[in-house]
Image (cartoon, grey):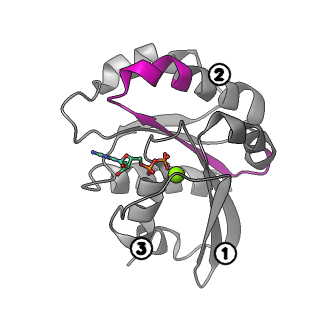
Amino acid sequence: MSIFRKLFGKKTKEANMTVCGLANAGKTSVINYLMHGDSKSTIPTMGVNINQIEFPNLQLNIFDFGGQTGFRNFWAQINEKSDAVVFIVDGNDKSNFEEAREVFHTVIETQINEGLPVLILLNKADLSDCMPRSEFIQRFGLMDIKPNISWAVYKTSAMSGKGLVEAFTYFVHLLEKET
Ligand SMILES: Nc1nc2c(ncn2[C@@H]2O[C@H](COP(=O)(O)OP(=O)(O)O)[C@@H](O)[C@H]2O)c(=O)[nH]1
Ligand SMILES: [Mg+2]
């Protein structure tokens, strides 16, 4: 059973969740894991993939963005209508870390509505080079986020699923409080 079906089973609304991050961070793999219980093989996402999960009482629309530079202009329009933002970072990719940080802060500061919950996933935690969570919080500038934004960061693996249930359980509770 999909994790989301368990989590959102009793809700009566439609919610939009956007999934952002650089190309190759693991966005599509995380969504596949949440929907199907495995990460499946992915191909680079062009534009945006919209995954809709229909529950008895909820339609959840998950927007999976292409991370390549050319597609990022679309993010702003879709993030504006979003109820929740997930930002995924490859915790092993040192060479693109700065770019990920800049893109993240652009999204947080210019693209989302006040008070929107933000879930940050330090992904590929199954690989040995993954940055420690405390170091990530500091270097990614998470302490500088405005206090009206509720954020949380979890180490995850879309390969094993480790951390994903915890992360999304937290996130759904936060969303329930907001609505
Ligand atoms: N080891 C490991 N590989 C991952 C993980 N998540 C994604 N990948 C791999 O990283 C590559 C990019 O993943 P994808 O989901 O397409 O990234 P996207 O561009 O952000 O959608 C693929 O080869 C995935 O198999 C993870 O948690 N651990
Ligand atoms: Mg993708």
Taking 86 as reference, is 114 above or below it?
A: above
Examine the rendering and report whether any part of residue 173 can be seen. no
Question: How would you rate the neighbour count of disc 3 (Cα within 10 Å): few for under 14, some for 14-19, many for 20 or more?
Answer: few
Residue that mark 3 sits on: 2
Q: What residue type is labelled 1?
A: Thr
Q: Tell me where the magenta segment starts and ends, as one range.
A: 80-100
Taking 162 as reference, is 96 above or below it?
A: above
Q: Quadrant of the C terminus?
A: bottom right
Q: Which residue is painted at 43% across and 14% down in the image?
A: 139
Residue that mark 1 sits on: 12
Location of residue 41 by image quarter = bottom left
At mark 3, the secondary structure is: loop
How far apart in space, not on screen, are marks 1 and 3 (Cα)?
Answer: 18 Å
Disc 1 versus disc 3: nearer the observer: 3
Residue that mark 2 sits on: 146
Residue 93 percent coordinates (x, y): 37, 27
At mark 1, the secondary structure is: loop
Judging depth in this view, the residue of 35 and 95 nearest the camera is: 95
